[in-house]
Amino acid sequence: MKSTSQRIRAVLAAVCILASGASLADAPVYDFRQPVKDGVILVGMECNHKSQSLEIGIFYAGNPPTKRMDLWKTSDLVSYDAKTYMVTSIRHVERGCVIGSDRYRVHLAGLPGAMNAMWMCGAAVTAKASVWKNGLPIFEQELSRCGVGDSVRLVRFVPGTDIPTLVKDEQ
């Protein structure tokens, strides 16, 4: 027979699991079936239980996602003041993923090219990805930064290792 504290913990764990799919930002999810237009940059993630992997990627019109995944426009993750063109807020989305016995937490935040949209790279909004595995940080990196060669395009995590596979764009 379970004690009251064990029941409360079980209920809280269930609520946390259900809430893990909720976004912490008001950024709308992008429909992966929609063609990616020029100038649109998407950041996405896929928790694939069948292949036992977690993938995080950044996508452009020239390399759109080839499979179903949760996607967000990076431009929805950064807000600018209409008069001054200065960044007013940086939003984020957070998702959970359970693969085998490992619990992953993925945090994707907007990453403006500059604090003013009119400066060099200012309108080029990409993303920063942070990943925790079983409560411990294992990855944090900017994805495809403006004007920087050798940018990360895709990150893949599999059980049994804390070191992800990185796919880079050589510029």
Image: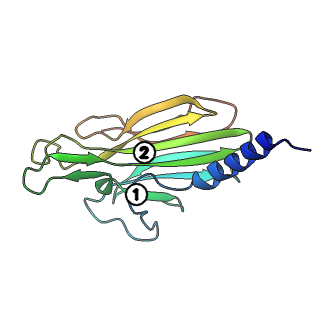
Q: Quadrant of residue 4?
A: top right
Q: Secondary structure at mark 2?
A: strand
Q: Residue 90 vs residue 70: left or right?
A: left
Q: Which mark is residue 139?
A: none
| Image x and y of residue 41, in percent | 32, 55
Q: Secondary structure at mark 1?
A: strand
| Image x and y of residue 104, in percent | 60, 40
| Image x and y of residue 10, in percent | 75, 46
Which residue is labeled 2 in the image? 108
Could you tell me which residue is drawn at 25 percent across and 43 percent down? 112
Could you tell me which residue is drawn at 60 percent across and 51 percent down? 47
> Is residue 52 something that shows in the picture?
no
> Is residue 3 something that shows in the picture?
yes
Quarter of the image with the N terminus in it: top right
Which residue is labeled 1 in the image? 72
The reply to whether callout 2 and callout 1 are in contact (CB within 8 Å) is: yes
